[in-house]
Image (cartoon, rainbow, N blue to C red):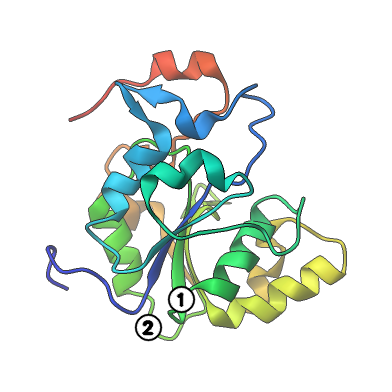
Amino acid sequence: MNPNEKVKDVSGVVLAGGRSSRYRENKALAQVHGVPLIERVLNVMRPIFSHLIIITNTPDKYSYLKLPMYQDIIKDLGPLGGIYTGLRVIPDNAGFFVACDMPFLNQGLIRHIVEIKADFDLVVPRISGYMEALHSLYGKGCERKIKGLINSGIYQVFRFFNEVSVRYVDENEVRIFDPDLRSFLNINRPEELNNFDNPS
């Protein structure tokens, strides 16, 4: 894939539907070096994806971004509900899903995840056994399995992974693109903003 070419068969999906309960305010609009978190995420995603959407239950807060926005089809399910909604509404057969509070996304890593999707239902980074479910590619083949989880009252994203075909991206592979694993850092509390320095 040409690094300057936009992906045409995978949509970019930003999940901004969380309540930010630990942050105590809308963390998507909290600023890192003067730029709101969600804008930092979008600045990385825009050059990669032809189709880019936001999943949010407060679309008025993000209308200034001029992107398509969708509210959760089923409310109060956390990230699982956002992924389910995204898979239902994207025009492509797969979506790269990322949380809105990750200030140091890496274009090279995201493009790599998209490039290796092949016929897998899911491509997910796995660091020290922990799966980065909110920095992953989900295919439409996941939709029915996610709906099954929802119907069972189970809302943990990873609980359906063993029911679909998965391509894990392990730590050594991730470090080729992101040596310090900064892609997966996220903001949960206001004081954490002070701990992040801008690598660029």
Give the answer, above or below, for where 122 lies relative to 64.
below
Reading the chain from its start, which is encountered first: label 2 or label 1? 1
Decide: is 136 above or below 59. Answer: below
User: Outermost residue toward the bottom?
Assistant: 119
SS assignment at label 2 = loop
Q: Residue at x 61, y 46 (%)?
A: 17
Q: Position of residue 30 (x, y in %)?
A: 46, 25
Q: Quadrant of the C terminus?
A: top left
* Residue 29 seen: yes
* Quadrant housing the N terminus: bottom left
The amino acid type, in three-letter code, at marker 1 is: Ala
The vertical placement of 103 against 9, above or below, is above
Q: What is the quadrant of residue 32 in the picture?
A: top left
Give left or right: position of 117 versus 145: left
In this image, 176 relative to 12: left or right? left
Q: Which residue is mark 1?
A: 94
Q: Is residue 176 visible?
A: no
User: Hey, what amino acid is under mark 2?
Assistant: Ala
Residue 152 lies, with reference to residue 26, above or below; the image says: below
User: Residue at the location (57% across, 21% down)?
Assistant: 189
